[in-house]
Image (cartoon, helix red, strand yellow):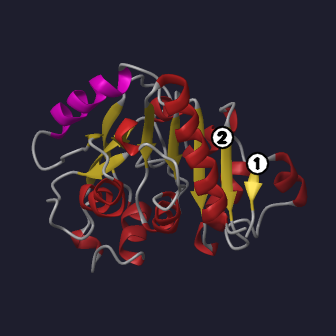
Amino acid sequence: MSLTRAAAEQAAAALRRAVDDRRLARIVVATGTSQIAFLEELTKAEAIDWGRVEMFHLDEYVGLPITHPASFRKYLMERLIDKVGITQYHLLDGTGDAREMARRVGEPLSAAPVDVAFAGIGENGHLAFNDPPADFETEEPYLVVELDEACRRQQVGEGWFRDISEVPRQAISMSVRQILKAKEIISIVPDARKAIAVKKCFEGKISAMAPASILRLHKDTTVYLDKGSSRLLSPATLASFSVGLT
């Protein structure tokens, strides 16, 4: 089974379970190139009552309008919200007062537990837009963060921007501690260009310099890797984590 299909099946099961148990599933959704195929599979899943799903946005650029091809609000509307008919959603609009937006969306996010969070891992090891050195201490649900050069270059490499000069320097990001509050985390990390970050996060120290390494402390995280992204990991590491290989 492919990485994305396996991850989508696990995600769909988590949504169905939450709706069955509490009549509502609260989810956090990641964006970016690494999540496109996963969301395509998830939106095909059967027997999900999307009308009972409340969705929160993981991160968004500061100053980028929703009409821009790289807007994560645009991405989520087109690839998830409009496709399945989610009516309860909280998007981050970074074109106004970013700190006020972080506070406003953080209030409903903090009001109840998140059932499942979807996340990727950046080429610099970032989790959401928490670039190294990430803040592992703050309890704020969302932060306004500075994007480092490696992160900004990744966005150019993935084709979202023509040049690094076009990439915003700030973003609104869900905090590391808030991500870890989710009952379940599903991390989808394909592609060989992520291999160095994956090795650093899963075989190095748990450190703010490798932000996604903190996932190792979460009690219910599944990390899905493919042959490219897992190519530098030792057999012992592969055996000790919940890793799905294509």
Q: Which residue is drawn at 66% across and 67% down?
A: 195
| First in sequence: mark 1 vs mark 2 | 2
Q: Is residue 224 above or below residue 110?
A: below
10 Å neighbourhood of mark 1: few (<14), some, or many (≥20)?
some
Question: Residue 10: x and y, percent?
Answer: 64, 48
- Give coordinates of residue 183: x percent, y percent: 58, 29
Q: How crowded is mark 2: few (under 14 residues within 10 Å), some or many (20 or more)?
A: many
Which image quarter holds the C terminus? bottom right
Q: Which residue is situated farthest in the front direction here?
A: 47
Name the residue carrying label 2.
221
130 in the magenta segment? no
Element at label 2: strand
Name the residue beneath numbered marker 1.
242
* Snapshot quadrant of residue 142: top left
Depicted 192 relative to depicted 83: above or below: below
Evaluate whether residue 53 shows in this view: no
**What stretch of residues is rendered in magenta?**
98-110
Q: Distance between the residues labelled 1 and 2?
A: 8 Å
Q: Does the magenta stretch include residue 99?
A: yes
Which label was assigned to residue 156? none
Q: Most prominent secondary structure in the magenta stretch?
A: helix
Is residue 188 visible to the viewer in this orientation of the structure? yes
Q: Contact, CB < 8 Å: mark 1 with mark 2?
A: yes
Question: Residue at coordinates 20% horizontally, 34% vertically from top-left?
Answer: 99
Residue 16 or 209: which is nearer the viewer?
A: 16
Left or right: residue 28 versus residue 121 is left
Check the picture and name the quadrant holding the N terminus.
Answer: bottom right
Count numbered badges in the picture. Answer: 2
Q: In which quarter of the image is residue 121?
A: bottom right
Q: At label 2, which amino acid type do we have?
A: Thr
Residue 203 image offset from top left, x and y in percent? 76, 50
Indicate the amino acid at tag 1. Ser
